[in-house]
Image (cartoon, grey):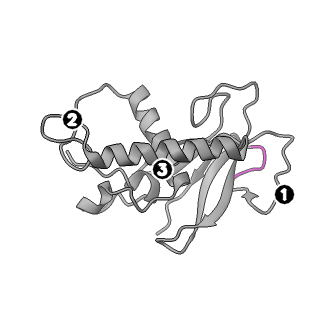
Amino acid sequence: GHDASRSFVTGEFERYSDELSDVSGLTDAELQQLLTWKEFYDKTYPYLGKVTGRYFDGAGQETEYLRLVRARVEKAAAQAALDGPKYPSCNVEWKVEVGTRVWCSNRSGTGQERTWVGRPRKVLSSVNESSGHAMQFCACLPDDATADQAMYGRFPNCEENAESCVIPDEQ
């Protein structure tokens, strides 16, 4: 196998390259997205081992690179906690024949349980310095949230009250 960690954020699954394991250029929010994917995989699939490379050496020990990534994630999480509560991220799955599906449940994204389900909304945030594009991700907004704020919007072809939306991959 090979490591394509970055692909879970960028969607670059078609062509593999060694750079797809490098997450140093991801923003803090993108790193959080990546961790959401990792948590999903840890819960859903049986553990089979480690891939030797950027994150683990031949003996299965953590590399310095992984320790730096973890330190950055911890720092980002601490900053996010200081910034105050945010809406939880959506559950996400990707299938080649469908594209990306996002959905909300009472245990979305990071796995924190709550009493409400919410609606998937596109969240536009700061511009990614490496790509120059506005970064977008999915958050579950409660029904009583002010969804007309500039940073929140419905996904194309997604009904206002939908709990699940399919986002076709861009060609």
Please report the residue visible at 35 percent of the width from the left and 50 percent of the height from the top.
5
The residue where tag 2 is placed is: 61
The percent coordinates of residue 20 (x first, y second) are 31, 58
Q: Main secondary structure of the magenta part?
A: loop
Q: Residue drawn 71% across and 26% down?
A: 114
Earlier along the polypeptide chain: callout 3 or callout 2? 3
Residue 148: assigned label:
1
CB atoms at circles 1 and 3 under 8 Å apart?
no
In this rendering, position of residue 129 left or right of residue 70: right
Is residue 60 placed above or below 132 in the rendered structure? above
Q: Nearer the viewer, mark 3 or mark 2?
A: 2
The residue at the point 75 percent across, 24 percent down is 115
Q: Using the image, tell me which numbered label, if any, was put on residue 132.
A: none
Q: Report whether residue 93 is seen.
A: no
For the residues marked 2 and 1, what is the alpha-carbon distance in whole angstroms? Answer: 48 Å
Q: Residue 60 vs residue 19: left or right?
A: left
Asked if labels 2 and 3 touch by Cβ distance under 8 angstroms, the answer is no
User: What segment is highlighted magenta in the picture?
Assistant: 157-161
Outermost left residue: 58
Viewer-closest of 13 and 157: 13
Task: Name the residue tied to disc 3.
Answer: 31
Please rate how many residues cluster around mark 3, counting C-alpha atoms within 10 Å: few if below 14, some from 14 to 19, many from 20.
many
Q: Position of residue 123 (x, y in %)?
A: 67, 56
Is 41 in the magenta? Answer: no
- Dot 1: element: loop
In-image side of 88 versus 66 (left or right): right
- Residue at 22% across / 41% down in the picture? 56
Which amino acid lies under the numbered mark 3 shown in the image of this protein?
Leu
Of residues 106 and 83, the one drawn nearer to the viewer in this rendering: 83
Query: Residue 60 placed where, x, y %?
Result: 19, 34
Q: What amino acid type should be assigned to the residue bearing mark 1?
A: Asp
What is the distance, in whole Å, between disc 3 and disc 2 at their CAs? 21 Å
